[in-house]
Image: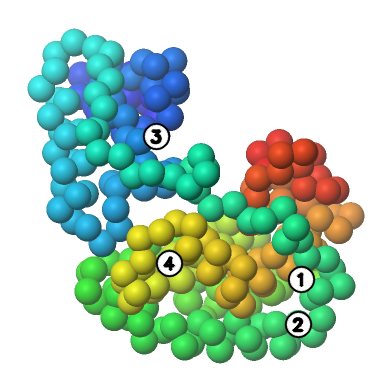
């Protein structure tokens, strides 16, 4: 994004970036940037708090009044992180195996039941906000979990979306599932806690278990394309202090 900002500025367009890592802003020197001391992923600050979000937007727009650069301004308010972590990370011991898959029909039925139970609250959340981020995959909500479950046999299913291969589509499907659950609970229960949301989604929900099973199947697969599911960090938010997930060479976990 910093490179794009420099390019746009060279074409006469003014830009402002918001960033969470001050060292990156200082090294890449975008023309105008606002440093946010927030947990990663909270570009506008606090969920369900439009007043706070408008303060962030106004602080960023005020930087357009500066003529010279690079300028780095610090947003005055801080949203603390827990234990120095920028976001939720799965406990290292929470690793499933292929043996945990069991009956695929049962796994899928449990996820479907869970999603159906959330649907009324999701619809209320969408109506209240007037928008949703679910839909990037192009699949209906009812199609998301079955598509993921199609990978649990160790093979790559056919993509139902024309012009997009199964693995890139899987990334969008996972994002849609996370958005469906997150949008529902942040509105219904007024949750403003990334750690709590992550713990619920990945450690307690049926869909979180479905994705962890996919991770297990991918790691055990001899199919190099299946292994990309893990190596491209499409799945669970892990941080491994002593190396990558067993069986992979991924550096980003």
Task: Determine whether label 1 and label 2 are within 8 Å by CB.
Answer: yes
**Is 189 or 158 nearer to us in this picture?**
189
Q: CA distance from mark 4 to mark 2?
A: 25 Å
Query: SS for tag 1?
Result: loop
On the image, which quarter does residue 250 sit in? Answer: top right
Q: CA distance from mark 4 to mark 1?
A: 24 Å
Q: Which mark is residue 20?
A: 3
Q: CA distance from mark 4 to mark 3?
A: 21 Å
Q: CA distance from mark 1 to mark 3?
A: 36 Å
Residue at the location (63% across, 56% down)?
90
Query: SS for tag 4?
Result: helix
For mark 1, what is the residue?
152
**On the rendered image, what quadrant is the N terminus found in?**
top left
Q: CA distance from mark 1 to mark 2?
A: 8 Å
Q: Which mark is residue 104?
A: 2
Judge depth for marks 1 and 3 and give the one in front.
Answer: 3
Judge depth for marks 4 and 1 and give the one in front.
Answer: 4
Left or right? Give the position of 202 relative to 115: right
Left or right? Give the position of 160 relative to 8: right
Left or right? Give the position of 6 relative to 144: left
For mark 4, what is the residue?
182
Pinpoint residue 139: horizontal percent, then vertical percent. 50, 71
Mark closer to the chain start, 4 or 3: 3
Mark closer to the chain start, 4 or 1: 1
Q: Is residue 161 visible?
A: no
Mark closer to the chain start, 2 or 3: 3
Pinpoint residue 61: horizontal percent, then vertical percent. 15, 33
Q: Residue furthest right?
A: 222
Query: SS for tag 2?
Result: helix
């Amino acid at each position: 994004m910093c490179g794009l900002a420099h390019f746009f500025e060279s074409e006469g367009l003014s830009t402002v970036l918001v960033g969470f890592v001050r060292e990156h802003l200082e090294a890449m020197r975008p023309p105008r940037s606002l440093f946010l001391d927030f947990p990663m992923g909270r570009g506008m600050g606090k969920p369900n708090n439009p007043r706070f979000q408008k303060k962030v937007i106004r602080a960023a727009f005020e930087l357009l009044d500066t003529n010279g650069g690079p300028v780095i301004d610090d947003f005055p308010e801080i949203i603390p992180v827990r234990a120095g972590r920028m976001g939720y990370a799965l406990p290292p011991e929470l690793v499933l195996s292929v043996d945990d898959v069991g009956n695929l029909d049962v796994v899928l039925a449990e996820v479907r039941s869970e999603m159906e139970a959330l649907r009324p609250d999701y619809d209320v959340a969408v109506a209240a906000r007037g928008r949703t981020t679910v839909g990037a995959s192009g699949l209906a909500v009812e199609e998301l979990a079955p598509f993921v479950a199609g990978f649990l046999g160790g093979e790559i299913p056919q993509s139902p979306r024309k012009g997009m291969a199964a693995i890139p589509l899987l990334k969008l499907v996972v994002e849609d599932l996370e958005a469906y659950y997150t949008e529902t609970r942040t509105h219904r229960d007024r949750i403003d806690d990334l750690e709590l949301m992550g713990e619920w989604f990945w450690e307690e929900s049926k869909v979180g278990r479905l994705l962890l099973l996919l991770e297990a199947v991918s790691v055990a697969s001899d199919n190099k394309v299946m292994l990309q599911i893990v190596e491209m960090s499409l799945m669970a938010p892990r941080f491994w202090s002593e190396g990558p997930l067993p069986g992979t060479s991924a550096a980003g976990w």
